[in-house]
């Protein structure tokens, strides 16, 4: 991870409401989070949690209903349509789960990667496309078409297409959802290499908890809000550099530490299972006391 210490994504009290006839669906209800430049971050959450909605807004594919969303210094709520199109072309790269949305089947691997550069009028397109194919480990497949590539190879080309215009932010929506676990590991390794060698900020949306354990920072979204974060105790660089990295000094495997998120208003989302354990889930109220340097939560009946 090449964290420069500067914010690349900042959202505050982000709200998204979808309206269908007389029905309103609240997809995001006050999301707050910050991602620093150079981070490789996974966003997890159950179906309907709002994670894909958030990713679409980062990619300029959807606009927030309210709140604040700034990416690379651009306030996405205030961009005109032409400014938004420029943002999508120059600032972000998008990798879809469905390869049909990434690849043109009658073009070769090389031609698919060249295509976005035609739209941006980039010179020396072929040379740059060949460099990307080399980075993806796919230079030997440059003349192959979609039906001649495996699912994992197609996804590598899809990542290459997303990199074609040198984006500052790479977004991936369930990028390993259509491949087996072994191929998924290889694809994640590509994202790691891109993040490490190119310094590109990467945000991956996934439902795969095992996959998300392999990145340093995981943001969990629940009911349209940031509920918690998981921070990896040992970086993946150390993990692969040292065979002992898998086992801690106490003989236990290193795990991600879950951190509850406190928003700007001081609100704290407590994991559901914790509230169930003390019998207060659904009651609407708890007793909170400050005891020395600890905050303790009790059932109101205690």
Image (spheres, rainbow, N blue to C red):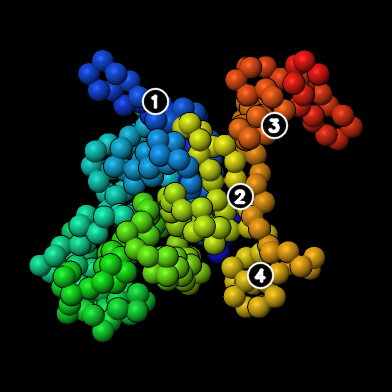
State if disc 4 and disc 3 touch (CB < 8 Å): no
The spot of residue 55 in percent (x, y) is: 38, 44
- Residue 115, given in percent of the width and then of the height, sits at 18, 64
**Res 26 label:** 1
- The front one of 98 and 95 is 98
Mark toward the start of the polypeptide (3 vs 4):
4
Residue at image position (32%, 59%) is 178
Q: Nearer the viewer, mark 3 or mark 1?
A: 3
Determine which residue is flagged by label 4. Answer: 246
Name which of mark 1 and mark 2 comes first in the sequence: 1
How far apart are the two marked residues, 1 and 2, measured between alpha carbons? 25 Å
First in residue order: circle 1 vs circle 4: 1
Number of the front mark, 2 or 3: 3
* Above or below: residue 153 compared with residue 231: below
In this view, the mark in front (3 or 4) = 3
Q: Secondary structure at mark 3?
A: helix
**What residue appears at the point 38 percent right and 42 percent down from the top-left corner?**
52
The reply to whether the C-beta atoms of the residues labelled 1 and 4 are less than 8 Å apart is no
Decide which of tag 3 and tag 1 comes sooner along the chain: 1
Q: Can you give x and y, in whole percent of width and height, for residue 175 in the image?
A: 36, 58
């Amino acid at each position: 991870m090449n964290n420069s210490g500067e914010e690349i994504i900042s959202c505050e009290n982000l709200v998204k409401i979808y309206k269908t006839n007389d029905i309103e669906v609240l997809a995001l209800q006050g999301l707050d989070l910050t991602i620093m430049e150079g981070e490789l971050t996974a966003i997890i959450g159950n179906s309907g949690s709002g994670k894909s909605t958030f990713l679409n807004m980062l990619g300029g594919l959807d606009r927030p209903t309210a709140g604040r969303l700034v990416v690379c210094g651009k306030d996405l709520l205030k961009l005109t349509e032409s400014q938004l199109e420029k943002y999508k072309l120059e600032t972000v790269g998008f990798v879809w789960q469905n390869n049909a949305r990434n690849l043109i089947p009658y073009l070769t691997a090389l031609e698919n990667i060249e295509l976005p550069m035609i739209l941006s009028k980039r010179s020396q397109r072929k040379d740059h496309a060949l460099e990307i194919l080399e980075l993806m480990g796919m230079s030997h497949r440059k003349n192959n078409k979609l039906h001649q590539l495996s699912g994992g190879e197609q996804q590598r080309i899809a990542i290459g297409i997303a990199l074609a215009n040198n984006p500052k932010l790479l977004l991936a929506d369930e990028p390993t959802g259509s491949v087996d676990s072994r191929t998924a590991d290889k694809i994640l390794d590509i994202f790691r290499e891109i993040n490490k060698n190119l310094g590109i900020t990467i945000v991956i949306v996934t439902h795969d908890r095992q996959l998300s354990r392999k990145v340093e920072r995981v943001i969990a979204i629940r009911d349209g809000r940031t509920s918690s974060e998981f921070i990896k105790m040992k970086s993946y660089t150390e993990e692969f550099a040292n065979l002992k990295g898998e086992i801690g000094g106490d003989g236990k495997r290193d795990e991600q530490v879950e951190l509850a998120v406190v928003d700007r208003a001081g609100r704290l989302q407590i994991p559901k299972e914790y509230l169930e354990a003390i019998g207060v889930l659904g009651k609407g109220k708890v007793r909170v006391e400050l005891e020395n340097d600890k905050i303790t939560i009790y059932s109101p009946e205690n």
